[in-house]
Amino acid sequence: MSAFVPPEPPAFATASPRERVARILTEVLAPVPLVISLLLVVGTHAAGGWTGLGWGLLAASFCGVVPLGVIALGVRRGALTDKHMRVRRQRVVPMAVSLLSVVTGVVLLALLDAPAEVGAVVVAMLVGLVSALTVTVWWQISLHNAVAGGTAMILVLALGPASPVLMVAAASLPAAAGWSRLVLRAHTPAQVAAGTALGGVSALAFAVLR
């Protein structure tokens, strides 16, 4: 399992149409954009208007902006080959630093009496990050699909499963992310499936704490 090393993705200019679509989806459905978008949606739903958006932005700063900065710094210094951290052994330190940032966010949101749903999303992210980091030590699980799976589950739980459109949109997130990672050969089917399952199970913390 540990011998799996994904190839460098094809350059966009020379990629096939299928690979270009996969590269676009990989960027749009990357963990950080999904995390930030999810927190803004849940924050707005929980508190409404600018207040809810503010809570979402505060949470997103710890769960999305700081991890993004850590990754960007790692790429700039050459510690990471790319922003998607395709080499497994390079993931541990950025994920550990991100874990500390998320823990800080959990504590701060609790002290500030943030809306329960916003705090519950961040705790679910913390559970998912701890789980993914534990697996990453010995196996290359798909972080894209872990976040996509968790995002889909939380959206359904937060906004309600009554809307067929919402259900389809939520289900499409891990499906699209997984397809893109497979096309780019960034992961095996097992790694994609395991990531989706881990994210979905971690999101159950949201259901308990919301």
Image: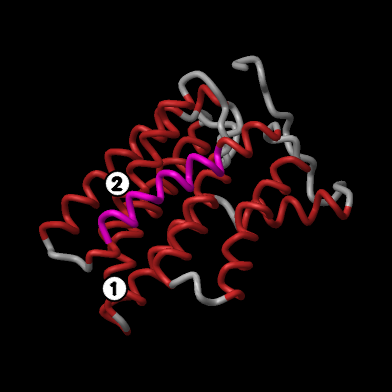
**Residue density around tag 2, few if under 14, some if 14–19, many if 20 or more, within 10 Å:** many
Mark 1–mark 2 contact, CB under 8 Å? no
- Position of residue 16 in the picture relative to residue 134 (left or right): right
| Amino acid found under the numbered disc labelled 1 | Gly
Q: Say which element carries label 2.
A: helix
- Position of residue 173 in the picture relative to residue 150 (left or right): right
| Residue that protrudes farthest toward the left in the picture | 111
Which range of residues does the magenta coloring cover?
195-210
Residue at figure coordinates x 78%, y 56% from the top left: 21
Query: For residue 97, which quarter of the picture?
Result: top left
Of residues 166 and 8, which is closer to you in this image?
A: 166
Query: For residue 50, which quarter of the picture?
Result: bottom left
Image location of residue 127, percent across then percent down: 34, 41
- Position of residue 160 in the picture relative to residue 126 (left or right): right
Q: Which residue is denoted by mark 2 in the rendering?
A: 102
Image location of residue 53, percent across then percent down: 33, 75
Residue at figure coordinates x 44%, y 72% from the top left: 160
| Residue that protrudes farthest toward the front in the picture | 162
Of residues 60 and 171, which is closer to you in this image?
A: 171
How far apart are the alpha carbons under marks 1 and 2? Answer: 17 Å
Location of residue 202 with respect to 207 vertically, above or below: above
Residue at figure coordinates x 39%, y 54% from the top left: 65
| Amino acid found under the numbered disc labelled 2 | Val
Location of residue 106 with respect to 44 vertically, above or below: above
Location of residue 66 with respect to 94 vertically, above or below: below
The disc at residue 54 is 1
Is 198 part of what is drawn in magenta? yes
Image location of residue 87, percent across then percent down: 59, 27
Of residues 150 and 59, which is closer to you in this image?
A: 150
Image location of residue 163, percent across then percent down: 54, 77
**Residue density around tag 1, few if under 14, some if 14–19, many if 20 or more, within 10 Å:** some
